[in-house]
Amino acid sequence: MRLRGEASRRTPRAGRSDHRLAARVVGAGALLTLAAAVTAVSVADPTPSAAAKPPSAAARPAATPAMVAVPKIGSRAGHAHPRPHRAVQRATQDAVAPSATRLSTSWGIDVSWPQCGNGGLPDLQTGFVAVGVNNGRPFTTNPCLADQVAYAKSHTGYAAYLNIDAPRVGDPTAYGRKAAVDGLARARAAGLHTAVLWLDVEVVNHWADPATNIAVISGAVRALEAHHVTAGIYSSQPMWQQITGGVDPRTPVWLATTITDYHQVGAWCASGLGGRPAVMAQYVATTGSQLIDVDMLCPAALPDAVTLFTAGRH
């Protein structure tokens, strides 16, 4: 999911100050306890051949717009909450598919609604694919979800992510719970029976003040945990700072960056979000004329990070 409000191209700084707020992100548990019962967790050599190397951008993409101002809660008074997906009423505690124990490479890509009719799905030797459940915002469905799920499952591992935002009126914690359970139901209905769901937190969607936003994220994380699903956080450092004040998410971190070369990923992995190192980092690359999001597992998180993915078909 390409960040559409990102402006920063700063070099990450280890030990960034953690602007913790009184209203912290939920005691949503510590960082994922990664599958101690799995006996053979491995990643194949990420660059066994030129064809399997992670792509880099032929040219740096044009600078993206500056981050937009975050509207205050209640700026559209009386705006109704989206209607929950009908599957929300059903239990979503069904068994998840087995976690991956081996990935063919330590890098993959993510796909969602931007890939619908926009050059199609890339033919790359990726180790994993992360699929966006929503159509860019919560309480919607990615119109290409079925095809992208099939594509993801043809790889050695796959994952899923959900868009979330803040309500314009009402209880933010309850709204976060509703958005997470709705997204989980859509994921399950599409066959994404994953043990980990990533929450996409970026400024292109509506957010309010940090305390309200933290309550939304807290509610979403708790709702997923109640359904025996681990919540991860996907965001960039500037966006996370703007939306939450830079708190420690206390969950696995998938870090978005604006770099275009996989050789630069390591330093970003170490800086993470809110002082928590990332387990995966994203950069922008090209394949042919198509821009793609490439995701690298962070070296310090291996081999345990493999179990964040559900086992695919190969």
Image (cartoon, grey):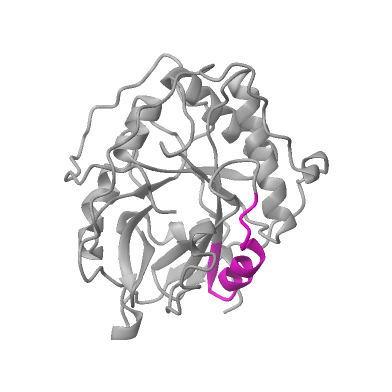
Q: Which residues are magenta?
A: 141-158
Relative to residue 74, is residue 312 depicted above or below?
Answer: below
In the picture, measured across the screen, residue 307 lies left or right of residue 203, that is right
Q: Residue at x 20, y 43 (%)?
A: 12
**Quarter residue 84 falls in:** top right
Can residue 12 be found in the magenta stretch? Answer: no
Residue 118: image location, x then y, percent = 48, 68
Residue 114: image location, x then y, percent = 49, 59
Relative to residue 94, is residue 153 depicted above or below?
Answer: below
In the picture, measured across the screen, residue 60 lies left or right of residue 293, that is left
In which quadrant of the rendered image does the N terminus lie? bottom left
Q: Nearer the viewer, residue 115 or 175?
A: 115
Q: Residue at x 25, y 57 (%)?
A: 265
User: Residue most toward the right?
Assistant: 90
Q: Nearer the viewer, residue 56 or 24?
A: 56
In which quadrant of the rendered image does the C terminus lie? bottom right
